Amino acid sequence: MFRHILRRLLLAIPTLWAVVTIIFLVVRVVPGDPARAVLGDYASEETIAAYREQMGLNDSLWVQYKNYILGLLRGDLGDSLVSRTPAWDQIKSVLPHTLELSLAAILIALCIGLPLGVISAMKRNTMIDYTTRIVSLIGLSAPAFYIGLLLMYFFAAKLGWFPAIGAGDFSDPVDNLRRLVLPAITLGMVETASVTRMTRSVMLNVLNDDYVRTARAKGLVESRVMRDHALRSAMVPIVSLVGIFTIGLIGGSVLTEQVFGRPGLGSRLVGATRQFDYNMIQAIMVVYALIIVIVNILVDLIYTWVDPRVRHS
Amino acid sequence: MPISRRQFAQLLGMGAVGAAVARVPAAFAQDAATLRIAMNTSDIQTLDPHYASGSQDRATVDMIFNGLVRYVPGRSDAFEPDLAEAMPTVTVNDDGTQSWSFTLKSGVKTHGVDTAPSADLTVDDLLFSFGKASNADSSAYAGDYAGWTFAAGDGANEFVVTTPTALSESLVLPKVANYSGGYIIPQAAYEAIGADGFITSPVGTGPFAFSAHNPQVDVQLVAFADYFRGAPQLAGVNVVFQADPTARELALQSGDLDVIYGLSEAAWSDRMDALDGYTSDVFGVGEQVFLNLNVEHEILKDAKVREAIIKAVSRDNHLALSGEPVAQKTFSVVPAALIPGGLTEEEAEAAGVNYQQDIEGAKALLAEAGYADGFELDLVTSEQTAYRTNYEVLQEELRQVGITVNLEVVQHATMHELIRQDRNPITIYIAFRPTADTYLTQFFSTDGGVTNFSKFTVDDLRDQARAETDTEAQEELWRQADIAIAQAYAGFGIMFVNQVFVRKDTVEYGHELVAVVQLYPGIDETTTISG
Amino acid sequence: MATATHAAGGNTAKLPNKQLISQRQRAWRAFKRNKPALVGAVMIIVLLLVAIFAPLIAPYDPLTQSVINKFQPPSRAHWLGTDDYGRDVLSRIIWGTRVALQVGVLSVIIGAVIGITLGVTAGYFGGKIDAVLMRIVDIMLSFPDLITGLLVMAVLGAGKTKLILAIGLTIAPRFARIAYGPVLGLKEKEFVEAARAIGQSTPRIINKHILPNIAGEMIVLGSLWTASAIRLEASLSFIGLGVPPPTATWGQMIRDGTVRLADLPLLSLAPGTALLIAVFAFNLVGDGLRDVLDPRAN
């Protein structure tokens, strides 16, 4: 097991390198100049040139790339071109907010979506099934920013139950949680719909599977069939799904974070893209890629655990 | 927010959980008398005042720094002494240069930080600050001070600014005022913090001192008790970043904010104003919206085509995007209503350059120019509402006369990059500039360089105006330049769009709001929140 | 997917024509019995008709502005009122159907073709191919939806085709990941091993035994992502990178409408409802197809 993890981690190195290199090139292909973004439209060409020189943007692509990779090898993610503070410091300060939001959304999605999906599959083509499917479809159709604004309209502006914007300090857990509720529901709603639908679909598949049929034919009690056979088989695709959702959520939090004025990795990335803060974009993408590598390793490990048929060569 | 809850949490030991993330001294962060103002952006760019250009940056540095003189609070057309004891005395020297002599107030304290404790502001600080502001390596506004020199005067606390030629007050005062390069940075603090550190932790002399920056959330300022005009009435100011207008509006109504940057739209402003407990303020300075037509473009080089384009445009259409009084028409590239040197409607009419929409006339002109079937133009626009909406209206106006505009929406900074590479044969520009000279220099002179989008220049008239010390004669020269630009169909003023900010009724800024060049309502030691 | 599987099966297996037809007929009969799926199919047909005949149905030119008459409330002349440029909202929603269908369907097709090819190839062959391909998928997955869209569109420039491509590239690794997992299990199954033992060619095994077994999942995913693609258009519009103006798109309309959420909710609710209907229809049909195509369900 340990060797397997180690192997996956080693395999992740070329992945990370590729991500870093692609991003390094892509951000520089996009027309736009970090100096212009920082200095504004009033700045003269002379000022822009001076700024580019100071930030090393006039170096050849190769020199910039070499410096960047050498920095990474030393564990240095580089300094933001805008604030000129270490990129990692900013990521460190926003990451907990993103993790908190994603975790809350996944919890909501799993707690509501899994049972709904299972029930829906078992009571297929009944009113319960139809209602579940229609409601989850509505959740799927509304863009996150729209749900967020509607929630904010009713529960913050009209009813005043929750604050409209901001994330709250971790030192004040009550305030922090109050500010987490609306964004977590916003993000969780879309994911709940996905989880419900996929769980239902996977369960239907499994219920039709030969060995479940056999178990039923053998006269096993329905609840036992579900527990011992169906649910266990359904776990494989569901685990895979949760893996993808985790990744998707951490990125998908962009709009939710923006609407609710929350700091976070996603909104920081959009901000950096707007400012052409190359170093910041690169640093965030490295962190993203790392998170994804870790989540994928976890998913594969859980695979092996729930489905012994899967053997890693 | 009640402090008791925080203390309660800390009693339970929960405070330790997030101690690493907490950055702000609790006592300041949540004080009841802290004013929370939301700006239309997702973060600051820089709080070094000599680089600040976004409105969120300009607003924030204005609360932290002072100039030698300042715009009278709430106004853009009058100055009064700020750090200087009085308005400057002017002498013209034998060599044609001109000296402006200021006396620094004594006892002005700088904000203190660990590495540079609070101290009296000195003439050396002034020398340092203008030295920094006039150097392209340390300022975005160095160009404003080309040829200017700065020196300590003979008298105590005397500071002398020398300009290479005699200039009128209207050209000199904005550059030594609380705006752009005119903000005074204390040398010791700047050197202790360093150029890079100063971007996110500035130190000045203003009513509020920088306390914390939470990326993408807010900048927190605290009252500076030793402010030379007296301690502020507010405990502090939180400049909150929220780019979504609906979220700002809802957060104001939920009580999370006290003041918000609004929509530049009259109907919206009226609706907010009608809400119980809120007041919407519409004030200057407006940002001028004007067209630049590239006279060297392969199709637009024909003056008939440019005339046709301008005759396809209706100021009423563009004006309706914001509605009066948020927006008001302008009749030349220099907005007469905002600064001296622009054309009024009557003046434009008299000069024969008050062009009106004339679809048939435009089509006829295009036919004469050999484009009876129209042509296609590729234009880029910023995603920002002000640009996008005006370009979309222009697109439809040109469609009416047979010109197809393929509009590409790009990020704001990308648009600024592309238009400087002459990507747009027709460039809509939206900006406030403090003087007619700045508009003409930046957009219609050879010195403008890449921002001379039209490739049409009025260098001579601009130079004559610059050398003219008689105010009226100077303004007349500027107006002649405006007319020349209009006659060449190289530039076309459409309107200016005012600022709209909504505040709770309990907020009083402490001054009448007419126009503020820093693009926010102006918050200082006199601002209060009651109740 | 369905036709591809059948056609390939028909060619290589030299199945009697009669059997192929009966298979299709069985599928059609099963589909017809599925009421929700039929409702969905009818809705999609209606949407298609609206898209095709938009110029005839729309009461106004969707581009004609009258800024002075902006934000008009619903009236007999403008059933859903006018937008921020004084354009007829109903006409823009009708024209927006075209873009929604194009973006939703085309981007999912692009994403599915790329993604399933990657996932199945990696899962089936294993070893180095698996390692390399799934690394590529991991790389693609490490870009969040919006960011892929944002970066691709920033590099290529804006435009409907580029938007479709950008969304397709976003979807592809998701298809790959979902296809990959089941293939790992399937290739160890008895019937696949049996097929290998009797010397069936790899493409044939993939077509006959692997693809049909993951088709259900893929179609459910496809229906989900058609919805998501239409929604992603709205999200990209929200950060200012949708289909360039003046083209009417639901996403852009919702974005512009939310600014007036408090006083003119119809401006965002109306296109939002159109979006809901389209997403709903595709999901109903997706579910129905899943039931029909699942070999074990019949």
Image (cartoon, rainbow, N blue to C red):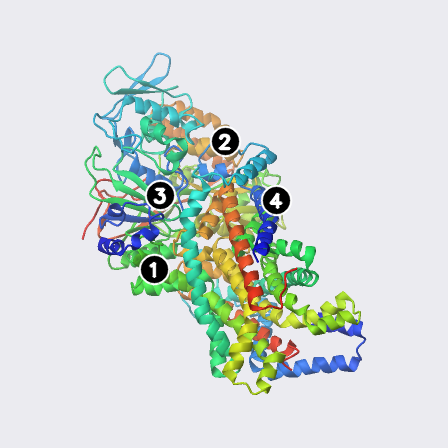
Q: Which mark is residue A45?
A: 2
**Which of pointers 3 and 1 indicates the residue nearer the eye?**
1
What's under tag 3, amino acid-wise? Answer: His
- Residues packed near mark 4 inside 10 Å, few (<14), some (14 to 19) or many (20 plus): few
> Are the residues flagged by discs 3 and 1 in contact, CB closer than 8 Å?
no
Q: Which mark is residue B368?
A: 4
Q: Quadrant of residue B287?
A: top left
Rounded to the nearest angstrom, the CA distance separating label 1 from label 2 is 48 Å
Q: Residue at x 51, y 59 (%)?
A: A248
Q: How many marks?
A: 4
Report the quarter where the N terminus of chain B lies. Answer: bottom left
Q: Residue at x 51, y 62 (%)?
A: A245
Marked residue chain, label 3: B
Where A219 sits versus A259, above or below?
below
Marked residue chain, label 2: A
The residue under label 1 is A177
- Residues packed near mark 1 inside 10 Å, few (<14), some (14 to 19) or many (20 plus): some
Q: Which SS class for mark 2? A: helix
Q: Is residue C71 visible?
A: no
